[in-house]
Amino acid sequence: MELPRGKSYIRLDQINQEDIDNLISRVNSCSWRQTYHIQPVSGLLNDPNGFCFYKGEYHLYYQWHPLGPFHGLKYWYHTKSTDLVNWENVGIAIKPDEYFDSHGAYSGSAVEHEGKLYLLYTGNTRDEHLVRRPYLCIALMDDEGNIIKSKKSVLDKVPDGYTEHFRDPKLWKVEDRYYAVIGAQRTDKTGCVCLLSSSDLLEWNFEGELATNLDNFGFMWECPDYFEMDGKGILVFSPQGLEAEGDFYQNIYQAGYVLGDKINLENRQLTHGDFVELDRGFDFYAPHTMNDPTGRRLMVAWMGLPEIEYPSDINGWANCLTIPRELSLRDEKIIQQPIPELQSLRKDKVEAQDELVDEKKSYEGFSGVTYELICEFEPGDALEYGIEFRVSEEEQTVIKFDATQGKVILDRTSSGKVIGSKHGTKRKCRIDGDVYKLQLFVDSSSVEIFVNDGEEAFTARIFPDIRSQDIRFFALGGRAAFKAVKWEY
Ligand code: FRU
């Protein structure tokens, strides 16, 4: 059978090897292939799944459609690492080959229990009229990496009051009981989260809906995640269907969190503050966290969004994951910082220091395609200051602080090939005070920017020409001083 060209549920084993090899060589010839981000060998990647530490290694799975850059039949793909930086492609973890996951092994999470890794995931099925019916499924991985799927689903029926959009269980343990939050849509087409519990991960009990104060907040909440930090309870989720509001909710779908008291499991209640977006850039969805052996809360996300086409599609692949970020709380707000392990990627280093007065300047050695750049600013009276990168005559991506508006602005209007321009080409975010630090992680087709040590993060795919490599620093309408260091990656 030939490679499918549009959405279909064709399995990998129905395709001949030659077609797959041709697809992979097309993918590998793409100049936008990433160098230090997790990306699919072919086809499309979406949500991170089952992020965990098991038997001395980090494991990170993701949603994968191997046969092309669209949302076809989904597998779980398995990667692992000892340092969170160098990831080994292990291969397929969960194949959608049973009646209860026949139309996709959808998102889920992992937890260790009695020496084995339990993967709790969503089995997606559709009948002959394409009516969707989700199941909750279990697979077990042993310490040699063998994965066995349970022959039965652990929840066969969507509970009354909810539609077929009932998926993405995220596990955690409290004393000797396991809990899972699961994304749901009520029959009145509003999104919410439900709670399940189990003593052995095999028999599950539907506890009911988690009460929040967001009763009418989008039509579906995907990929929920619950965890606690500094005595607070945090619910992360990806709501769909929010209208843009000023600088907020600019992407097709959102990803963020609410923070409050610890979850009350008895009466299934979360009292909390406002919904806060986790990232203020363009391409960030379905974040997924884990608690690592040193007690850190680590997060990765899909660096992409549903229903958006990407320029790499023509080369037979789409999307990647973000770098792992460590979460902490500052004034009851989540702070995101790149994990220090990434410093092992640092190679050639260049530095520059200057005072800019209404000008734009470039410096010896400041150019490239894959690098980390830290720039500390001493703001003067400049109206705006910032950095242009992946620059050529025609192209540039800009991150700047606009002092008049008090906003950080990421501008990909001229970044290269256009992505989802219907949703705008600039993202803005108000911050308290000035921008004193920008940290950029640039890969062949992406940038992740941490503002003021993780107070805000901006993530974006960019698709510049390979020759667009310059970096320029600027201060306009006044002066600003800066000190920058860049490491080749
Ligand atoms: C989110 C999502 C999940 C689902 C998965 C399917 O991006 O739609 O809700 O489980 O992707 O790939």
Image: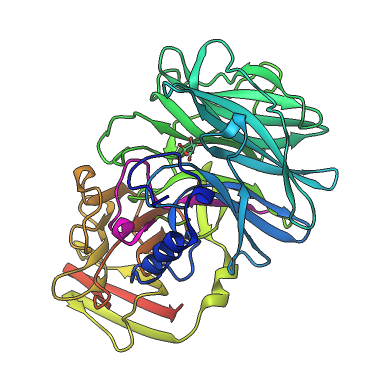
Left or right of residue 431: residue 134: right
Number of numbered discs visible in the structure rendering: 0
Rendering coords of residue 360 (x, y %): 18, 76
404 or 113, nearer to the observer: 113
Q: Which of 116 and 295 is in front in this view?
A: 116
Name the residue at 80% across, 55% down.
Answer: 143
Q: Nearer the viewer, residue 329 or 35?
A: 35
The stretch in magenta equals 296-317
**Residue 285 rendering spot, x and y as whole percentages:** 43, 44
Q: Which residue lies furthest to the right in this view?
A: 114
Q: Where is residue 466 in the image (x, y as percent from the top left)?
A: 27, 75
**Front-most of residues 69 and 181:** 69
Q: Residue at x 72, y 57 (%)?
A: 294
Residue 63 appears anywhere in the view: no
Q: Can residue 73 be seen in this view?
A: yes
Up/down of 262 relative to 416, above or below:
above
**Residue 9 belongs to magenta span:** no
Q: Where does residue 31 sit, x and y in percent of width and height?
A: 33, 71
Quadrant housing residue 101: top right
Q: Is residue 402 left or right of residue 127?
A: left
Q: Which residue is drawn at 55% across and 39% down?
A: 107
Residue at 24% across / 82% down in the picture?
362
* Residue 303 part of the magenta segment: yes
Q: In this view, does 21 lie to the left or right of 389?
A: right
The coloring applied to the image is: rainbow
The image quadrant that residue 173 belongs to is: top right
